[in-house]
Amino acid sequence: EVQLLDSGGGLVQPGGSLRLSCAASGFTFSSYAMSWVRQAPGKGLEWVSAISGSGGSTFYADSVRGRFTISRDNSENTLHLQMNSLRADDTAVYYCAKEVRELAFDHWGQGTPVTVSS
Amino acid sequence: QSALTQPRSVSGSPGQSVTISCIGTSSDVGAYNYVSWYQHHPGKAPRLMIYDVGRRPSGVPDRFSGSKSGNTASLTISGLQAEDEAHYYCCSYAANYVFGTGTKVTVL
């Protein structure tokens, strides 16, 4: 059974940093690209970042490029999102998601909440 | 990249059909058949309902169907059931992923 367990969210001040993690199990982690998707309060889903199975290619939404860094440790079956220079509009629930070859997300984590506030 | 446009809400009685539209552009929905749909209940993880415009993952009831015409994709729920009440999001791949604005489906 595929499982994705998000963690690392919390309360942080504007300008601060936070590192999210997603522990994966139940599939060959290194064979699949992974993404982070977020949902701000009262808003819809927003794709944030993606990384290829090998980790050699990374992609970012314009809203986070230069501030967020996605990475993965295939030996530990773990996905990360390093978030720097956080702003109030980064406040959201962050989900990790497993991508399939048909460019969709077939499994999601339960989400970890991030609040950026002074 | 701008979010795809969905109606804010749709509603129907049990057993009826509802259709949710997802309007994009010739650079996203119109350019690729990589359109997917997600069901999202508050506080839960989103669930993949449709991928590749009209394909259903195993376990998704055949009451859910997807289609596309030009720059507009659609999700139809036939034989609406109480448990279908949720938010639904379309998503298209266009160099990167772009989600729709989301539609609240209410079962009357």
Image (cartoon, coloured by chain):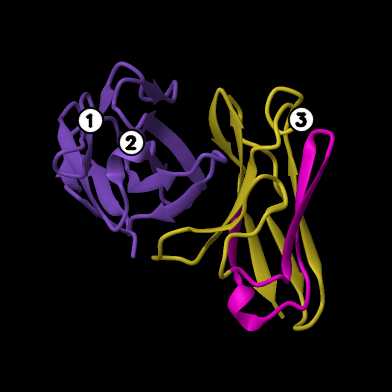
Q: The C terminus of chain B is located in which quarter? A: bottom right
| Chain where mark 3 sits | B
Q: Is residue B47 visible?
A: yes
The shade of chain B is yellow
Q: Are marks 1 and 3 on the same chain?
A: no
Tell me the number on the disc at residue A83.
1
| Residue B10 position by quadrant | bottom right
Badge 2 is on which residue? A90
| Residue B58 position by quadrant | bottom right
Asked if residue A77 is positioned above or below residue B49 in the image, the reply reads: above
Residue A12 % position (x, y) = 16, 40
In percent of the image, x 61 and y 73: which residue is there?
A: B85
Check if residue B72 falls in the magenta segment.
yes
Which amino acid type is shown beneath numbered disc 2?
Asp
Q: Say if mark 1 contacts mark 2, CB within 8 Å.
A: yes
Q: Nearer the viewer, residue A77 or B47?
A: A77
Q: Which residues are magenta?
A: B60-89
Badge 3 is on which residue? B30
Q: CA distance from mark 3 to mark 2?
A: 30 Å
- Which chain appears purple? A
Q: CA distance from mark 1 to mark 3?
A: 33 Å
Residue B107 % position (x, y) = 69, 77
In percent of the image, x 62 and y 47: which residue is there?
A: B36
Check if residue B67 falls in the magenta segment.
yes
Q: CA distance from mark 1 to mark 2?
A: 9 Å
Residue A30 % position (x, y) = 29, 38
Asked if residue B92 is positioned above or below residue B82 in the image, the reply reads: above
